Amino acid sequence: MTIAITIFIALAVMLLDFIAFLRLRRNAVKKSVMFSFLSIVLISNITIILTPVLMYSMIEEENSCYMMKISMCLLTLYLALSLPRLLLYIFCLSAKRKWLMWTGISLSSILFLYFLYSIFITRTNYIIKEIEIEDNSIPAMFNGYRLAFISDIHSGSMMNTTEEIGEIVRIINNSNVDIVFFGGDMINIHHSEINSSQLDEFSRLKPRDGVFMVLGNHDTGAYIKNSDKDKREANIEGLVHKVESAGWVVLRDSTIYVRRGSDSIAVTGIDYNEELLKYKHSMDAVKAVDFAALYNCVPDSIFNITLSHLPQLWYSLCDNGYSDLTLSGHIHAMQMKICSFSPARFMYKEWSGLYEKENGKLYINDGIGCVGYMARFGARPEITVIELSKK
């Protein structure tokens, strides 16, 4: 959907650029005004042509982080120059009254400033969301148990990766949590995006019961140029080795048990297998997971927390009684959430925050990093702190 929206915007802006050019030439405006206009139009339209070339044609293992950042910066520059210009055209090309023209200039200027704010402020303006989960099946010893949940770091598109990861770690360590979960998409393209200094920051996470994660679609190496199964498996092995060296545990279709006295809860991690790559944004993703085998040895009576990168799996997890609380990421509200609106709602029924059904709950974290463009419009990077409460 992001690609379709971008193509639509690009074609609309190009058409209006041409109309505006004809009008400016007909009105014989000053050469300096015409030069400025043509410069902005040229830079803008070149960036939208270069972006897919860099993103899809030049990304290899060894340059994935570098090329991804360049292509994302180009797309961000395009949007910052084009959307305000599109708004300006809406008012000015048909305006016969001066106040309409100045309204268009004012609104487009405000939109451009909002773009800058979303790039340089909102993108790293972390929000801590405190959530209470009440359930009769939570064991007595886990009443008040606190967990931190983060997702979608996308380290390859962070501008100051080590510093940004360090800030996330500091916030979590100051949140007094017992355990930390990560919902997948640590990287964009290749595990080389994670270096030793970033691993040092990750190793500073020291909750009492450990740090556990699952893989997301970007972690599989599926976006490496000429990707094949061997490349994907090598990328996964490299990433798993790195995060485990930082003390994290990767759950790959496996379950661990956390104990408090005589009570226990189960934590199950759904791996991002080869089949799931076909269903990144589809409700048919349930076809790629053998839920019965995954939960075969997990007692029905135990409170279960499931980490699933894809929230689309929740319906099967909930309706079949496998998971009491499912934690997911993947969507990050498409990095655009103004009040309760996001384009994500047109693709997903559940796309952000807490959802409840009779047999279970789902929480979708808005993620930390960026994909596609280097900005967050209202969808602040999220660190979720969940406290379990026995009814």
Image (cartoon, rainbow, N blue to C red):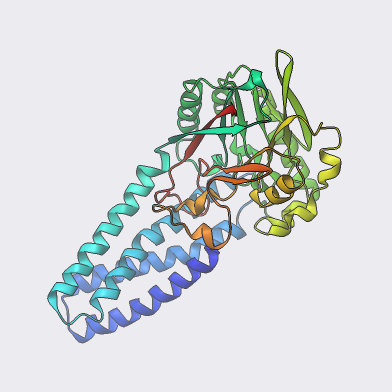
Q: Quadrant of residue 326?
A: top right
Q: Quadrant of residue 105?
A: bottom left
Q: Quadrant of the C terminus?
A: top right
Q: Nearer the viewer, residue 87 or 27?
A: 87
Could you tell me which residue is drawn at 39 percent across and 52 percent down?
339
User: Could one spot residue 227 in this view of the protein?
Assistant: no
Q: Quadrant of the N terminus?
A: bottom right
Could you tell me which residue is drawn at 25 percent across and 57 percent down?
110
Q: Nearer the viewer, residue 364 or 11?
A: 364
- Position of residue 349 measured from the top left corner of the image (x, y, whole percent): 58, 57
User: Could one spot residue 3 in this view of the protein?
Assistant: yes
Establish if 27 lies above or below 295.
below
Could you tell me which residue is drawn at 58 percent across and 32 percent down?
134
- Position of residue 142 measured from the top left corner of the image (x, y, whole percent): 63, 21
Left or right relative to 241: residue 73: left
Number of numbered discs visible in the structure rendering: 0
Left or right relative to 293: residue 79: left
Q: Nearer the viewer, residue 140 or 214?
A: 140
Establish if 127 lies above or below 34.
above
Q: Quadrant of residue 202?
A: top right
- Position of residue 245 measured from the top left corner of the image (x, y, whole percent): 68, 23
Could you tell me which residue is drawn at 31 percent across and 68 percent down?
85
Establish if 147 lies above or below 106.
above
Q: Residue furthest left?
A: 98
Q: Residue furthest top?
A: 261
Q: Nearer the viewer, residue 230 or 290?
A: 290
- Position of residue 333 measured from the top left corner of the image (x, y, whole percent): 50, 51
